[in-house]
Amino acid sequence: MIVRPLAIAAFFVLPLAAQAETPNLTPGDWEFVSVTSIDADMDIPDQTDTDRQCITQEELDSADFGFIEEEEGCELLNQDISADGLSYSMVCRADGGEANIEGEMRFMGDRVEGDVEIFTQSPMGEMTMNTTIEGERVDDC
């Protein structure tokens, strides 16, 4: 399915090169939990994914640090970044379908919150996925 890797909202792949400020995040070991609900013609249960990541101060200060995973076949359309968060939109095309993605992340020191909405049109029909992301610093790396 085209949107599965995107539903996690993925972390730390696309650089925030345009960013002038360091993200308002405390370095350390972070745990991210994403819950995805799907509105489609068929009944699909909610999915919960958990990811842990060590974030260092050097990574936060680096121009290579990012939060958006840009998969093959996807195009980042818009990205607005500040120390307190980011919002973005992108489109992905594959296997005769298209997914439009709108996302927002809020950086709050030792916590992160975010929402991603994905609207998909494919030969199997239309589907809307809503993902809520919560992250918290749990320990030192």
Image: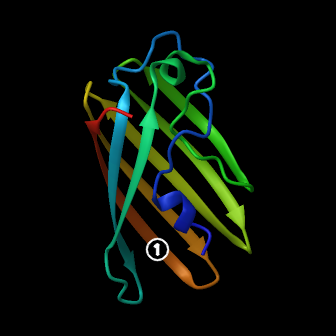
Q: Residue at x 52, y 9 (%)?
A: 20
Residue 64 location, quadrant: top right
* Residue at which label 1 appears: 127
Tell me which amino acid carries mark 1: Met
Q: Residue at x 60, y 75 (%)?
A: 1
Secondary structure of the residue carrying tag 1 is strand
Instruction: Name the residue nearer the viewer: 67 or 96.
Output: 67
Q: Residue at x 49, y 26 (%)?
A: 80
10 Å neighbourhood of mark 1: few (<14), some, or many (≥20)?
some
- Residue found at the far front of this picture: 141
Say whether residue 24 is left or right of residue 120. Answer: left
Colour scheme employed for the rendering of this structure: rainbow
- Residue found at the far top of this picture: 20
61 in relation to 59, above or below: above
The C terminus: image quadrant: top left
Q: Residue at x 34, y 20 (%)?
A: 24
Q: Position of residue 41 (x, y in %)?
A: 41, 87
Q: Position of residue 56 (x, y in %)?
A: 46, 26
| Count of numbered labels shown in the rendering | 1
Say whether residue 104 is left or right of residue 132. Answer: right
58 in relation to 91, above or below: above
